[in-house]
Image: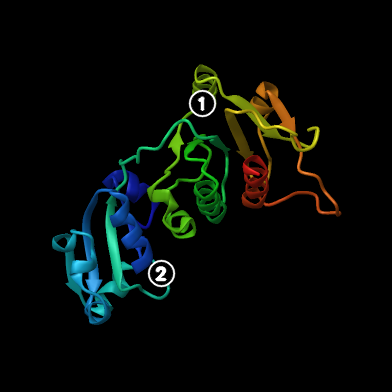
Amino acid sequence: MHRKDGRLLEGLFLVEGTKLVLELLQSGWPVLQGLVTELWLETNSLQSLNGYSSHFQVITKDQMERVSGFTTAPGIIAVGDAHFMPVVPEDSPWLILDGIQDPGNLGTILRTAEWFGFNLILATPSTVEALNPKVVSAAMGSLFRIRPKVLDQQTIFEMLKKNQYELVVSSLDGDGMPKVWPVKTALVIGSESHGVSDFWLNKADLLIKIPSFGKAESLNAAIAFGILAADYRL
């Protein structure tokens, strides 16, 4: 489960650390098994595991170090069902992720998306796997509530048109930030290295541009989304 092929084969993924495991349990995500160390139990109790105490097995610190993918092993690990999709409201602004490759960026984007109420997240197949351990860690629990749904570009486009969403794309050819955002906005964030693909640029209802005041050529994808999301909400 530390490798993508293993997660796909088993249909399972790992969540490590007290905060993230508790977020997972509280989200209602199906948890199949868990491990805790004897040391963890000295300051916590199995009763704190939101009704899942019977799913957890007590192991030694040495055993946890062999199981964990972290440099410093946590006191608790949970095994989640990789097939589960949380239910989210579809009347929120939509976020489309097109080829985001960096796991830390994706996790930060998910955390930011939940903060600003972009609950429906659609991702193209070229986007990094959402259950990658680095994504799970960087998302700080948001992944368990707004996991991206992976679909091809054409299917996503047909969905947004069917639901009467307007496609908003950030581009160097854009006309600045919108004075008024569409009521039903679908915002596209492109890959770190190539930006938004031509597919979305050619179908955009609105091309926008984050204003620049210095000499930097581009913005980090997660930072760019945070700026756009804040502008949408404010």
Residue 74 appears in the figure: yes
Looking at the image, residue 229 lies above or below residue 22:
above
Q: Nearer the viewer, mark 1 or mark 2?
A: 1
Residue 218 located left or right of residue 2: right
- The residue at 55%/23% (across/down) is 157
Q: In which quarter of the image is the N terminus?
A: bottom left
- The residue at 49%/38% (across/down) is 121
Query: Considering depth in this image, is 139 or 88 the residue closer to the camera?
Result: 88
Q: Which amino acid does label 1 sit on?
A: Ile
SS of the residue under disc 2: loop
Q: Where is residue 164 in the image (x, y as percent from the top left)?
A: 55, 19
What number of labels is visible? 2
- Residues at circles 1 and 2 in contact by the CB criterion of under 8 Å: no
Q: Badge 1 is on which residue?
A: 156
Mark 1 residue crowding within 10 angstroms, few (<14) / some (14–19) / many (20+): some
Q: Where is residue 71 in the image (x, y as percent from the top left)?
A: 43, 73
What number is the disc on residue 230? Answer: none
Q: Quadrant of the C terminus?
A: top right
Q: Where is residue 200 in the image (x, y as percent from the top left)?
A: 64, 27
Q: Which amino acid does label 2 sit on?
A: Phe
SS of the residue under disc 1: helix
Q: Badge 2 is on which residue?
A: 70
